[in-house]
Amino acid sequence: MKNLRIAACILCVLLVYAFFASDGTWHFRTLQWFEAHSDSLGADYYARQAEGFRTGHLYIAASVDPRFETLKDPYNFDERSAAGIEGLWDASYFRGHYYLYFTPLPVILFYLPFRLIFGAYPPDSLAAVFFAGWSFVMALLFLRRAIQKRVWLWAFVAAFGNVVIFLMPDIRIYEIAAMCGMAMSITWAWALLRFVELPSTRSAMWMSLWLALSIAARPNLLVLIIPTAIAIWLVRNLRLVRAALLPLAVTMLVLLGYNTARFHKPFEFGRTYQLEFTSMVGRRLCGICNGKEALRFINSTEHYLFWPPSFDRHFPWVTLQLAHLDPDVSAPLGADTILGVVPMLPLVLGGSLFALVLGLRRDSATTAATHIMFGAWLTLAALSTCWWVVARYSLDFMVLMSVATAVCLERGLALLEQCGLRTLLLRITIVILAIYSILLGILLGFEGLGGSFRRFNPSLYQSIGHTLHVKVR
């Protein structure tokens, strides 16, 4: 019976993901690498990269305008425009080929296996369902192992209390990379819990492997090394240190070799050769080296923490607002939408407070949760040093924060009860706020990035409003 409930829960979440990823059509059309399933910039790039790998190349399967070779500076947007040359947007151009500066991990984990089984490539939307579903399953496994009460409520918070569904209606390479990183990092969280429960060579290697894949998917997740190192240090076993270093070392060597084979530089991921509005040569995207960048860090932290959604009387009643960035130290792209973790998941404040209080407790679930919460906050801080703020980046920490918050709140409530305090009102408040996060995340899906849901399926959007007897945007 328990397994049946778990299966029903997973199926429910996957159906919701599939609904929004297909814009309410429930249809996912497979494609060949040269076909497009979306007009959005950045769509279908992973299918092209998979085709490149399948045919024995590190570059993606895309033709390059031969006039690129005649340009003095092919990374200068004005020079390309004057010559009438349209490069592949946000790809990395190097010596006559296009490469991706995004992680190749989704290609290895999903696109190539899918091509091998079905003879065609999946649309990016189906890949999003795969990685978001992976993330949910691992979050559910973590919660079932770490807490005993309200597991299903917290599981739905982990599934919907973030911007995953908001991103689903218009999926491109950007969102796939972020969701892949989310899946790897929550799997790292589960492996960290298992390691804290039973430190061993095997659990140390598994924890390190998922940490390495998290970094491979999203390099800014490198900061998760710190809570991982603390967890290993607390055990004080040199054998476990060596076991944990092995997967990290192997993965890093593979990544550095991959970069060297593509760009002849081990630490060049392709950013330098990115085709953008501005040349990326010599640009530093992240860091705090002067007063302007320190102010940028403060502003970006405010966005990732507190930037609110906008509410109005038109269905779906909520939308995201544009960020306000300093153009002198930000990407020259204007601004994108962003949602702070506190307006999305207000319970994270209580969870973080309890994490500080419970930091010295020795039970494995609490120890793992405090490490994960620390890692999530480090990730938020690392993102805030960069020159671009966007909603999808919050996937790097939101799901980690949600599962850590669940454990810390449940442990914190138990501690208060042990001290003789009544917690009924607090528990009711927690349930109400959890339901708020779930509903907010689902409603955002009916908006989608740039109103994508109503743009791609206007008839269904109008029909929902008519059924609810409310005005639509």
Image (cartoon, rainbow, N blue to C red):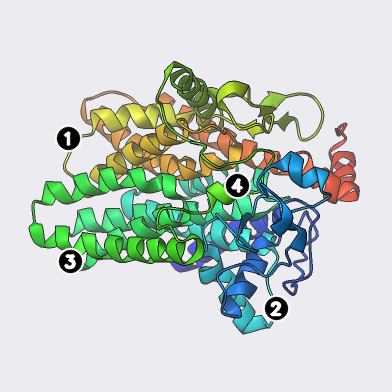
Q: Between marks 1 and 3, how big is the CA–CA gap?
A: 25 Å
Can I make out residue 151 in this image? yes
Disc 4: which residue: 164
The residue beneath circle 1 is 360
Q: Which of marks 1 and 4 is nearer the N terminus?
A: 4
Q: Where is residue 272 in the image (x, y as percent from the top left)?
A: 54, 47
Q: Which residue is drawn at 39% across and 39% down?
A: 376
Circle 3 residues within 10 Å: few <14, some 14–19, many ≥20: some
Numbered label attached to residue 120: 2
Q: How crowded is mark 4: few (under 14 residues within 10 Å), some or many (20 or more)?
A: many
Q: Mark 1 or mark 4: which is in front?
A: 4
Mark 1 packing: few (<14 Cα in 10 Å), some, or many (20+)?
Answer: few
Quickly name the residue at label 3: 201
Closer to the observer: label 2 or label 4? 2
Viewport quadrant of the C terminus: top right
Residue contact between numbered discs 3 and 4, judged by CB atoms under 8 Å = no
Direction from residue 369 to residue 77 in the image, left or right: right
